[in-house]
Amino acid sequence: MTHTVTRRAANRHFLMCPPEHFDVVYAINPWMDTSVPVDTARALAQWETLKRAYETRGHTVDVIDPEPGLPDMVYAANGGIVVGGQALAARFTYPERAKEGPAYDAWFTGPAALGRGITSAGQSGETQEGEGDLLLVGDTLLAGHGFRTTRAAHDEAARRLGLAEQGIDVVPLELVDPRYYHLDTALAVLDTGETGNPPLVAYLPGAFTAESRATLERLYPDAILASDDDAAVLGLNVVSDGRCVFLTDRAGRLADDIAAAGFDVVPVDLSELFKGGGSVKCCTLELRPDAATAAHGTA
Ligand code: ARG
């Protein structure tokens, strides 16, 4: 495939949580194996490399303090969803992660968030795992359900974040494979469509019901389809700024297909964080400011 589109980067604000307390001491997804040791120092070094990769490309990274006893807090994408300067904090499926919801909400309520043009809309009442399942593609919120976030949580997020008022439609997508328990493990947002190109995603067809596959085919006829092998290294768990796509260095053909579509592929080694069932996107929550802050820019 040869590409004819020019990819343009947009500056992003991210929230990340250093894996100082990262470990695998419980198993709430099929990737986690408590008998496999974790090298926390190595996890931290890999995480720092990812953070620097964002910063050297002009993105702003805020850091939330990790809390002892919350080993999965490094997966900041799950902390909530931030759209139009309104942050709705997560409510986790498993009790092991329950305290992360208030921890992320405390950040959304604090001075750092305010400085970024973000205010808290509180914590979700329904089970909702943030950008693990809620992925914004321009004016479409792709909303995963089946394992973690519920349909009721999609409706609640739409209501409390005023998505309809912002012209954003919610499209539910049902996940069926326990290995791909969050939408961001089964689908990668490559181009949101905001810089003039058509929106583009990559996904693993087998992770979805037939009905959801049909929805994806209708919305994204040019989507990149991932192989089982690339999905199984969490190759779809990417962050894209519209030009650079940050993804695991273990991805094979998927990385080639992304490059062929005109993106700069930035491979990152997150082998320690893979042991918890997460990769690049899981470690990264996007902070979308209110319109006024976005217009002035805070980077
Ligand atoms: N161990 C975490 C869990 O099972 C991993 C979360 C990964 N995050 C993500 N955005 N997919 O909840």
Image (cartoon, rainbow, N blue to C red):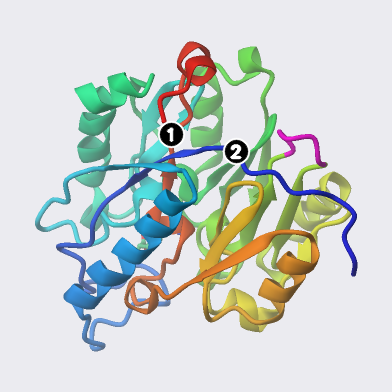
Query: Which residue is found at the position 11% from the left and 58% from the top?
Result: 69
Q: Main secondary structure of the magenta part?
A: loop
- Image coordinates for residue 71, horizontal then vertical, percent: 20, 62
- Image coordinates for residue 243, horizontal then vertical, percent: 66, 51
The stretch in magenta equals: 193-197
Residue 165 against residue 273 in the figure, above or below: above
Q: Is residue 175 visible?
A: no
* Residue 183 falls in image quadrant: bottom right
Indicate the secondary structure of the residue bearing disc 2. loop
Q: Can residue 299 be seen in this view?
A: yes
Query: Which residue is found at the position 56% from the left and 28% from the top?
Result: 155
Viewer-proximal residue among 158 and 237: 237
Q: What amino acid does circle 2 point to?
A: Ala
Q: Which comes before the other along the chain, label 1 or label 2? A: 2
Compute the Cα span from label 1 to label 2: 13 Å
* Residue 104 falls in image quadrant: top left
Mark 2 lies on residue: 10
Q: Residue 287 carries which label?
A: 1
- Image coordinates for residue 128, horizontal then vertical, percent: 43, 41
Quadrant containing the C terminus is top left
